[in-house]
């Protein structure tokens, strides 16, 4: 029996996940002599509308190719029943549905309905693989890169290959092939042309030399810049901040008591390089281990609230989130209702 063209890709590693989606898209286009593509987010469309679209023939192409992101938000029994029912009857459908989530799993009833060979969790790349990935990416494109430059890139760029690929590609437009990229080049290209992200937002909030009011002003300015981009996504922003505060809590755990922490222990925990160590050392002077835990609880509750209420109040919730982290250390609004 032919398996339905339904896929479930979960996990935080965006680069490899997007490559897998692209491979399926190309295969579907080749198999069907063309496809009509649609991209949706679970919070913005009804499941029954997607299923109705999949059940009907395309007016313009032999087949449909639909990606549905944030699939972990499909929780209503009626939505799950409709989706599972379609999956079970879709073995002869030319249409493709790819369910995507940055979480490690979605509702088990949906997972079970998707063929086992079509399900994959894309885990975050291990720390010891990242330098090799960066070196290989530069080499593949005709460049070399110094060890110091690799370390600096990994300290400045988010933890997924999609962002690494995007940031490293900047060098290919600025230097001739055969050039060795140095730490000075990284500072010049990435620092001066750096896009704002959850990680630069965390850096601004963790500037312990500044007053809380100054840090709040800088953080809100960065948040506004992030919100003005086409790719602005509150859930993704919270995921990035959650990673940073989990690392801060780990930093506190490593440095608890009077024990000395070796360089090997720091690197194994994701604190490779002086820049990363300096960042979390500064952050630890602002937020205690208990405060980091409170902030993580606040991040989680804000994430849930945004998923429940959709985009209508997202900006207000994010501004309140940053205020609570910077001014109240995450404690004041840890149970805040929006």
Image: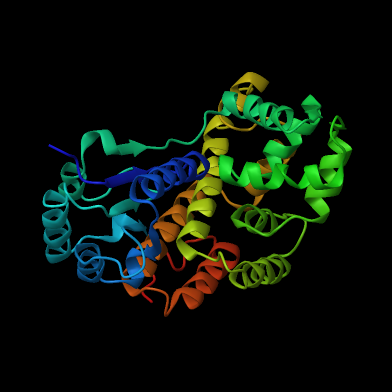
**In the image, is 144 to the left or to the right of 220?**
right
Nearer to us in this view, 206 or 172: 172
Q: What sort of colour scheme is used for the picture?
A: rainbow
**In the image, is 75 to the left or to the right of 289?**
left
Q: Where in the figure is residue 87, as x and y percent of width and height?
A: 17, 51
Residue at 49 percent across and 61 percent down: it is: 330
Q: Where in the figure is residue 321, as x and y percent of width and height?
A: 51, 67
Task: Count numbered badges in the picture.
Answer: 0
133 over 43 or under it: above or below? above
Q: Where in the figure is residue 284, as x and y percent of width and height?
A: 63, 45
Residue furthest bottom as drawn: 312
Nearer to us in this view, 72 or 180: 180
Residue furthest front as drawn: 33
Residue at 41 percent across and 37 percent down: it is: 122
Nearer to us in this view, 4 or 152: 4
**In the image, is 43 to the left or to the right of 212?**
left
Residue at 29 percent across and 66 percent down: it is: 58
Q: Quadrant of the C terminus?
A: bottom left
- Quick check: can you spot residue 257? no
Nearer to us in this view, 280 or 106: 106
Residue at 54 percent across and 53 percent down: it is: 241
Q: Quadrant of the N terminus?
A: top left
Q: Where in the figure is residue 230, as x and y percent of width and height?
A: 58, 69
- Quick check: can you spot residue 288? yes
66 over 151 or under it: above or below? below
């Amino acid at each position: 029996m032919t398996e339905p063209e339904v896929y479930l890709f979960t996990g935080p590693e965006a680069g490899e996940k997007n490559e897998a989606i692209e491979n399926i898209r190309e295969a579907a286009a080749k198999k069907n002599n063309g496809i009509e593509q649609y991209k949706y987010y679970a919070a913005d469309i009804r499941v029954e509308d997607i299923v109705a679209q999949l059940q009907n023939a395309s007016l313009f192409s032999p087949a449909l190719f639909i990606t549905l992101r944030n699939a972990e938000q499909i929780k209503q029994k009626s939505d799950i029943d409709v989706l599972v029912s379609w999956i079970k009857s879709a073995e002869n459908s030319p249409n493709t549905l790819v369910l995507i989530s940055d979480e490690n799993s979605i509702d088990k009833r949906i997972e079970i309905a998707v063929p086992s060979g079509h399900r994959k969790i894309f885990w975050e790349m291990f720390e010891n693989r990242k330098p090799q990935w960066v070196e290989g990416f530069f080499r593949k494109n005709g460049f070399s890169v110094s060890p110091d430059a690799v370390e600096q890139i990994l300290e400045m760029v988010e933890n997924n290959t999609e962002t690494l690929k995007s940031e490293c590609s900047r060098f290919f437009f600025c230097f001739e092939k055969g050039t060795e990229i140095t730490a000075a080049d990284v500072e010049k290209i990435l620092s001066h042309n750096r896009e704002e992200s959850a990680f630069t937002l965390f850096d601004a909030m963790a500037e312990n030399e500044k007053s809380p009011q100054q840090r709040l002003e800088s953080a809100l300015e960065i948040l506004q810049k992030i919100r003005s981009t086409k790719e602005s996504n509150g859930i993704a922003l919270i995921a990035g901040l959650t990673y940073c505060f989990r690392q801060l809590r780990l930093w506190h755990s490593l440095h608890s008591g009077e024990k000395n922490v070796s360089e090997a222990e720091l690197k194994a925990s994701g604190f490779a390089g002086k820049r990363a160590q300096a960042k979390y050392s500064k952050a630890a002077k602002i937020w205690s281990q208990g405060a980091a835990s409170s902030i993580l609880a606040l991040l989680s509750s804000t994430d849930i609230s945004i998923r429940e209420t959709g985009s209508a109040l997202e900006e207000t919730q994010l501004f309140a989130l940053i205020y609570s982290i910077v001014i109240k250390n995450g404690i004041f609004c840890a149970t805040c209702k929006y």
